[in-house]
Image: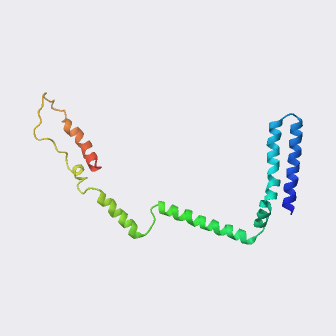
Amino acid sequence: MIAETVCAAVSAAGLGVAAITAYRKRFLRAARIAAYSLVPIGLVMTGVVEWAADTAFSPTAWAGFGVLGAAWLLFVTTRAVERRGGGTRKERKAAQAAQREAIAPAASAPSLGQGTRPAARPTTTPRAAGSTDSGDDFSDIEAILKKHGI
């Protein structure tokens, strides 16, 4: 009952302000103020204010909000744990095994030994005594690329 009275008073005051604004020839602003002023009385007429007042003073409603909050908290917590890689021990072991199977067993073999050179390589210019073979320069890169399966 008090909430309905307050809403009606707010609407009446807002409509008074809208009338004064319209008197000052600011019709667009007056129409906007009138629209905002009619919202509280419209809520009273539809029964939303009474429902909200009953809900605000109902212990059952507050307990329901508490239950909804607990459910939301559980949902968010389980999603966070799931994203961090949680789960059962069997699931984690299966994921690790699948990851190991995805990598070829000989993928890292070139990185352990020296790179391979072609057997017969024609050279057109004589090399200086201190220069390195261009195949050696790229063998490290090739080994890294092979290691990663590229």
Foreground of the two, 74 or 21: 21
What residue occupies the far left of the structure in this picture?
Answer: 120
- Compared to residue 56, the image places residue 119 above or below, namely above
Q: Measured along the vertical axis of the image, is residue 150 above or below residue 57?
A: above
Camera-side residue of 126 and 110: 110
Query: Number of callouts in the render?
Result: 0
145 horizontally vs 50: left or right: left
Q: Residue furthest bottom?
A: 60
- In this view, the residue in front, 116 or 55, is 55
Q: Is residue 24 left or right of residue 61?
A: right
Q: Please state the horizontal and vertical placement of residue 85, each as a whole percent of the image.
A: 44, 62
Q: Position of residue 1 (x, y in %)?
A: 86, 63
- Write the residue at 29% across / 56% down: 103
Q: Quadrant of residue 71?
A: bottom right
Question: What residue do we see at 86% from left, 57% from top?
Answer: 6
Q: Is residue 106 above or below residue 69?
A: above
Give the residue drawn at x 38%, y 70%: 90
Q: Quadrant of residue 125?
A: top left
Q: Nearer the viewer, residue 13 or 114?
A: 13
